[in-house]
Image: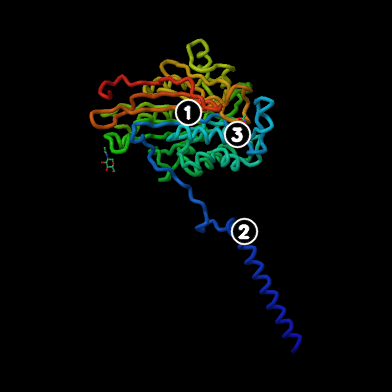
Amino acid sequence: MNSSIGNWKHTVLYLTLIISLLYFIESLISHKLHINHNKIHLKRSPNLPLRFRDDGTFKILQVADMHFGMGIITRCRDVLDSEFEYCSDLNTTRFLRRMIEAERPDLIAFTGDNIFGSSTTDAAESLLEAIGPAIEYGIPWAAILGNHDQESTLNREELMTFLSLMDFSVSQINPLVEDDSDQTKGGAMRLIDGFGNYRLRVYGAPGSILANSTVFDLFFFDSGDREIVQGKRTYGWIKESQLRWLQDTSKQGHNQRILGNPPALAFFHIPILEVRDLWYTPFIGQFQEGVACSIVQSGVLQTFVSMGNLKAAFMGHDHVNDFCGNLKGIWFCYGGGFGYHAYGRPNWHRRARVIEAKLGKGRDTWTGIQLIKTWKRLDDQDLSKIDEQVLWETSDSFLK
Ligand SMILES: *[C@@H]1O[C@H](CO)[C@@H](O)[C@H](O)[C@H]1NC(C)=O
Ligand SMILES: *[C@@H]1O[C@H](CO)[C@@H](O)[C@H](O)[C@H]1NC(C)=O
């Protein structure tokens, strides 16, 4: 009798112990278990659609080739010996914050090699840290991939998925079959080469006659990483399926009666072959290294020209080229290397490109775009502004 009461007491004691242990463990790891719990992080979305400001401007900051690794432990490349000791990825972060403070962009375009895959053990962590300042400031941002982003723990599809889910991101994995550029509605993705092909439309100024119309069309492309063509190793390129999508969509969704097709810009990482020809033209900025691109000529320039409204394309990849040159009426501009863990040149400052569009002033309302300008800033003491130039100006007299 006594021993059975003893056993019973022991059982209760053990059960209590086990239950409290379970509670304790659960409280430790519950944030990792509760997928459908309110603790899950919901994406913070920027105010959409993107639109011009009340003052009739829209400004884009292009950030090319951050080559982010693992933050403070990732050293700088190609800086002066005297700078090396106190230089890490944190300098890239600091430069991004300075650029945001100085320019207050409406959109940031990260044009690939955002992270340097082989210098990180966790691609997602690196992206969160690299893009961090854009999120801190709540600025809408769009990213595409370079040839180094996937060299770590995520493949290109996973990277674009992750990028599209980060706070304040307007990046998309690929366009939908019925593309009206609103992926929140769901629907099937169009079969297209690569990951990170999408269109962003920018609406007119609030309260203006074009407040609900696209006045600026931005196209982002995945230019791939590396490929083997007829036994030769070469870089990726923008494929026919991507160009077909561009042709199909650039015609859609415009109020053509008022506006015609609004000015458009393109963003991609790897330059096209024809950029090499710019050496023989009066380019603006510096042409200091060979254009590293695919040997395949897929008709990108021809497609851009045939659109009629594509004014400029912005690329990265070759860090110590930062020029703009004109091919058949279209500007091709390098961003210039941004990141400190990327190759560069000692004594040649890391830099970033800014693109600003200005609306025309009608009799009593903002109209369509009148002017598109670009300039760069150096990561020097004064964030020196250099190479300012006009990329496009309307000849439409009713906008003036
Ligand atoms: C990197 O950042 C540190 C700390 O802010 C600064 O002292 C150093 O000059 C920076 N290096 C370069 C090359 O900008
Ligand atoms: C734009 O849409 C808003 C909301 O639907 C409407 O109030 C406004 O009048 C529209 N503006 C123009 C110029 O069509």
Question: Looking at the rendering, which quadrant does residue 210 occupy?
Answer: top left
- Comparing 305 with 105, the one in front is 105
Viewer-nearest of discs 2 and 3? 3
Is ligand 1 within 8 Å of the beta carbon of the residue shown at mark 3?
yes
- Comparing 286 with 181, the one in front is 286
Q: Determine the residue located farthest toward the bottom in the rendered image.
A: 1
Q: Residue 268 location in percent, x, y?
A: 50, 28
Report the amino acid beneath label 1: Phe
The quadrant of the rendering that contains the N terminus is: bottom right
Q: Residue 313 location in percent, x, y?
A: 46, 24
Callout 2 crowding tier (Cα within 10 Å): few <14, some 14–19, many ≥20: few
Circle 2 SS class: helix
Q: Which numbered disc, 1 or 3, marks the residue that appears first in the sequence?
A: 3
Report the amino acid beneath label 3: Asn
Circle 3 SS class: helix
Q: Determine the residue located farthest toward the top in the rendered image.
A: 280
The quadrant of the rendering that contains the C terminus is: top left
Q: Residue 230 location in percent, x, y?
A: 61, 21
Relative to 181, say whether 83 is above or below: above
Relative to 281, say whether 146 is above or below: below
Residue bearing the label numbered 2: 29
Spatial separation of the CA atoms under disc 2 and disc 3: 35 Å
- Comparing 220 with 240, the one in front is 220
Residue bearing the label numbered 3: 91
Q: Which mark is residue 153?
A: none
Q: Which numbered disc, 1 or 2, marks the residue that appears first in the sequence?
A: 2
Residue bearing the label numbered 1: 267
For image coordinates 52% across by 41% down, the residue present is: 161
Callout 1 crowding tier (Cα within 10 Å): few <14, some 14–19, many ≥20: many
> Horizontal placement of 202 versus 363: left or right?
right
Q: Which numbered disc, 2 or 3, marks the residue that appears first in the sequence?
A: 2
